[in-house]
Amino acid sequence: MAKILLIAGHGAGDPGAIGNGTSEAVETRRVVNALVSPLKNNGMDVTVYDQNKNAFAEAQVGRLNFGGTFDYVFEVHFNSFNSQAKGTEAFITSSESSDSIEQDIVKRLSKYFVSRGVKRTNFSVIYNAKLRGMSSCLYEMCFIDNAADMQAYNNNFSSIIKDMANAIADGFGKTAGSGNASIPEAPNKQITEKDDDIMFKYIKVQKSGNEEVWLVFGNKRKHLGPKELKDANLLLTRTGHSTKEEKYSHDNYALKMIEKLTDEVK
C-alpha cells in the first residue's frame, strides 16, 4: 500500500494568492481534503499535513517535519500572475527520476485547463522531501486570478478531484510489487549506495570562490575528486539520474538543508 502525504499550500496567516473571491490557502485545503477519500478508496494510505501550519514557512526556518516517511509527497498550490495567464502544471525536483504520475495528472486535467506541462524546479518543500528520499510534486491547480480557470475549476471540481486521485493511484498501481531497480556497481564502490532513489551532484562555491563538486546519494554526501567525479558520472548515467550540477553559494539555504539532512562520508 503506497503511503501518500498531502500538503495544502500556504495558511497559518498566509492567504497565498487571492482572486475571484477566494484565496489560495482556502482552495488548497479544499482540494487536499477532497482528495483523501478517493485516494483511500483506491487503496492508498493517506496522511494530511497539519493544516494549521504553512509547510513552506516551516521549511524556511528549518522546522519542516513531514511526520514520517512516504512514497509520495503531493503539495497543492494555485498560480497567480496577471489575470490573463491560465492553465494547470506540475513541478518536480531536478533529481526526480520519473515524471509519469505528474504527466498523467496534467494530461487528465487538460480536459478542464490549458496544459502547462511538467517542469523541474527545486521548490523548498518538495526539495526537502526529495532530500529525505521521498518522491514529491508541487501541483499548481490553475490560476486563481483567471476567471475562466476558476469557473472551470468550480464547475468541474468533483471530476477534477477524481481524475487527480486516479492518476496518482494508477501511477503506483503500475509499479506495485516491482520494487526499486538495482543500482549497477560503479568502479568506485565508495560512492555506491544500494537501493537509494535520490542521487545528484551539486557545486559548492566556497567563500574564497573555489568550487567543490559533491555527490548526494540517499542520506549521505561525498566530496568528489577528479577520479571520483568520473565514477560518479558513470553511476548517475547507469541509474538514470541527471549528471547536471546545481551551483550553490556557501550561504545558500538549499545548500544548508542538504548539509543538514545528509551525512558526509570520506
Image (cartoon, rainbow, N blue to C red):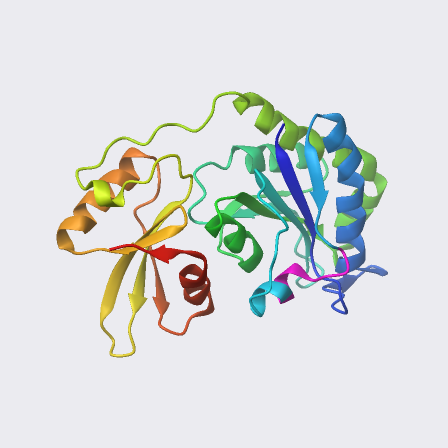
Q: Quadrant of residue 205?
A: bottom left
Q: How many marks?
A: 0
- Report the magenta residues as a range: 51-57
* Residue at 44% from the left image edge and 62% from the top image edge: 260
From the viewer's perspective, is 116 left or right of 40?
Answer: left
* Residue at 55% from the left image edge and 45% from the top image edge: 136
The quadrant of the rendering that contains the N terminus is top right
* Residue at 32% from the left image edge and 32% from the top image edge: 183
x, y percent for residue 167: 64, 30
* Residue 235: in magenta span: no
x, y percent for residue 190: 23, 45
x, y percent for residue 94: 43, 49
From the viewer's perspective, is 196 left or right of 208?
Answer: right
x, y percent for residue 144: 74, 56
- Residue placed furthest toward the bottom: 208
* Residue at 65% from the left image edge and 43% from the top image edge: 5
Q: Quadrant of residue 9?
A: bottom right
